[in-house]
Image: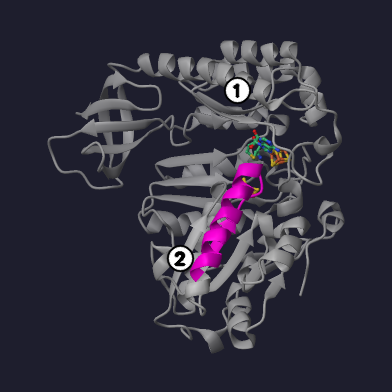
Amino acid sequence: MHLPDYKEARSRSKKEYNRIEFKSNNKIANKYSGKKFFLKTYGCQMNEHDSENIEALLVSLGFSKVDDYNEADLVLLNTCSIRENAHNKAFGMLGRLKHLKSEKRDLLIGLCGCMAQEASVVEEILRDYKFVNFVFGTHNLYQLPNIIDKAIEENEQQIEVFSREGDLVEGLPVIRSNNYKAYVNIIYGCDKFCTYCIVPYTRGRERSRKKEDILTEIRDLINDGYKEVTLLGQNVNAYGKDLYDDYNLGDLLEEIALMGIPRVRFMTSHPWDFTDKMIEVIGKYPNIMPSVHLPVQSGSSKILKRMGRRYTRENYLELFHKIKDTVPGVSISTDIIVGFPGETEEDFLETMSLVEECKYDNAFTFIFSEREGTPACKLEDNTSLAEKEERLQRLNAVVNKYFLENNKKLEGNVLKVLVEGISEKKDMYFGYSETNKLINFNCDRELSAGEIIDVEITSAKTWSLDGKAI
Ligand code: SAH
Ligand code: SF4
Ligand code: F3S
């Protein structure tokens, strides 16, 4: 048994990590043929991509996937700790599974992902959720086949969570959920330690993948017909810092753009290390999508300082306008937290005025959620939840106003859309524009997923656009 420990998770060493190649355990390949699994993913793209590896590892054991957990022999929850509601959703699901297990004694239940890295979650599972068969963390996902095999063979709860990141594992099998768009990890972990955030504890220190490994993965994707890659990291702008003296995200983006894949995206960018070279490269290559997710969190420099964000309102706005001025037609989206401890009405109004200035194309807005073990937990907080909810509503009204206003400007324009398929609800084709807008459209001829076509925009909505293929 290995239990998570925050002290260890917080520590950062200069130790070089090893790059190792994943080796499958042939002794247990297909051992569980005929068994079915249900996998539920909470959280960010990183977790979604981890689930693509998990699925392939389960298939290598012989499991096949089902969409209804009632039919499964194994239910695995890939969890997220970012806010309390993500946490509550996973525990709610465990409650339903407890009921199911009382009728189906052989049901295997597992939990992995970020919540598995939290000591308090694992303690709760040991105490109150004894029916959970196994838990593993984000640093040892590759051990899943052996952990499951052991849980079944020994019929004993397996808790295998490492607080410190170990080797960086290359060559994990993957079953991608989309045949045209792929996620590619470029950097793991986060060293920023924003005071509200749990990610640096659940994902470990920043570790970049070697550029050769990334470029090989993308070359293979291009050969398999992929049209779009999204480079993933909690902070992609830190790419390369731990590995190279003089090679960063700007250089990587440029090399990938030159490989000729039609669309390259990247997320998430922390404003702190957004270099001029990056902005220049994004503006220069038409296949690097003009779409930047640039989380601001707050418009008040006082609150930004308390959040440990390393920039002021002014620094942020300067960067924002530099990107807008250099990259033609760029869309910028953001994340905002309201109700951070100590946020006054004046601070909140600064966030509102920043939004009025930036007129974001998209924004994800949240009420501050206290995460155990993070420094923000210890800050005094005098604002009631009702007041925070009211701020969130006011903020959402302004951000929505600008989503619609920006979309309206696109009416009559012709946009390039990567076709995803047919939306059953609307009986129309759908896909995403270069600036990542959801487009529903009609077309006289039959289209295949993965095509990139021109669509004329006929009407704008707040969260999508309608159009007609030309
Ligand atoms: N690495 C990304 C963010 C990943 S988490 C970045 O720094 O930009 C996604 C978003 O969740 C954050 O941008 C933040 O807005 C929100 N978030 C993180 N911790 C939170 C918390 N404790 N309470 C509320 N929102 C939080
Ligand atoms: Fe969390 Fe900040 Fe790291 Fe983003 S940059 S993952 S908000 S600590
Ligand atoms: Fe959640 Fe972990 Fe992602 S906390 S947002 S799943 S890195």
In magenta segment, residue 248: no
Instruction: Say what secondary structure mark 1 lies in.
Output: helix
| Residue 28 point in image, percent of width and height | 54, 86
**Residue 454 got which mark?**
none
Vertically, is 161 above or below 268? below
* Magenta residues (range): 76-100
Residue 43 seen in the current view: yes
Identify whether 470 is placed above or below 23: above
Q: Amino acid at mark 2?
A: Phe
Q: Residue at position x 76%, y 75% from top?
A: 1
Q: Which residue is mark 1?
A: 392
Confirm whether residue 242 shows in the render: no
Q: Describe residue 417's horizontal placement relative to residue 283 as left or right.
A: left
Residue 372 image point, x, y percent: 78, 46
**Label 2 vs 1, first from the N-terminus:** 2
Ligand 1 quarter of the rendering: top right
Q: Please state the horizontal and vertical placement of residue 433, each as a whole percent of the image.
A: 37, 32
The local crowd at label 1, few if under 14, some if 14 to 19, many if 20 or more residues have their Cα within 10 Å, is some
Closer to us: 376 or 202: 376
Q: Are marks 2 and 1 in contact (CB under 8 Å)?
A: no
Q: Residues within 10 Å of mark 2 (few under 14, many from 20)?
A: many
Tell me the residue that label 2 is attached to.
Answer: 38
Mark 2, ligand 3, within 8 Å: the answer is no
Q: Position of residue 82 (x, y in %)?
A: 66, 44
Q: Main secondary structure of the magenta part?
A: helix
> Tag 1: residue type?
Leu
